[in-house]
Amino acid sequence: MVCSQPRGSTASQDIMKNLTKGFGKMLDACKNELNLGDHIIQDFYNYWKEEYALVNRDVGCAIICMAAKHDLITDDMKLHHGNTHEFAKSHGADDEVAKQIVAMIHDCETSHASNNDDCSKTLEIAKCFRTKIHELKWAPSMEDIIEEIMTDI
């Protein structure tokens, strides 16, 4: 089997950077749609920083909005596995990495299933996912994320 992506954390960091950038393209639309303050942008800039405390419920609401715009969640607010797999692949993940990303999000979703507040639950899922990505050393560097964002402005 020939893999299209080189193995290792650098390739995976690039994939996560591409996923973050692609997913984040909807942030401004969701910020306006949900009437969220500029603080939401700061939370997303700092998302990959392990030491950054994600405590704002609005982040969860914004993630729901962005995920919905990318067709990554179902009507009952659960991860759409097929669409999420394809989203990951369209941002540079090979089949194996895309499956791993979906599995990690699903595990986080399952561990927070008892939370009935969709925005709070989504915030907890996002924090869980961030932890799993850091454990794999896949988190993109803040410098890369900021550079990508500044290039788009």
Image (cartoon, grey):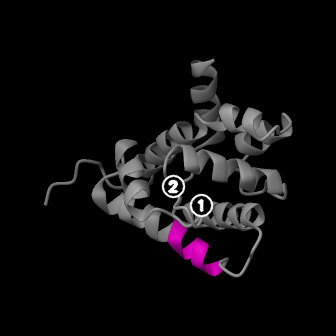
Q: Which residue is mark 2?
A: 138
Please indicate whether residue 147 sits to the left or right of residue 32 in the image. Answer: left
- State how far apart marks 1 and 2 are (Cα): 6 Å
- For badge 1, the amino acid type reads His
Residue that appears at 44% across and 54% down? 9
Label 2 secondary element: loop
Whole-percent x and y of residue 5?
A: 29, 48
Please indicate whether residue 65 sits to the left or right of residue 68 in the image. Answer: right
- Quarter holding the N terminus is bottom left
Q: Is residue 22 above or below residue 101?
A: above
Q: Which mark is residue 134?
A: 1
- Quarter holding the C terminus is top right
**Quadrant of res 118:** bottom right
Q: Is residue 53 visible?
A: no
Label 1 secondary element: helix
Of 120 and 50, the residue lying toward us = 120
Residue that appears at 61% across and 45% down? 66
Write down the region rendered in magenta.
105-111
- For badge 2, the amino acid type reads Trp
Please indicate whether residue 39 sits to the left or right of residue 123 in the image. Answer: right
Of 90 and 140, the residue lying toward us = 90
CB contact under 8 Å: marks 1 and 2: yes
Provide the major secondary structure of the magenta segment: helix
Residue that appears at 44% across and 56% down? 84
Crowd around label 1: few <14 · some 14–19 · many ≥20 (10 Å): some
Whole-percent x and y of residue 56?
A: 84, 54
Whole-percent x and y of residue 30?
A: 69, 38
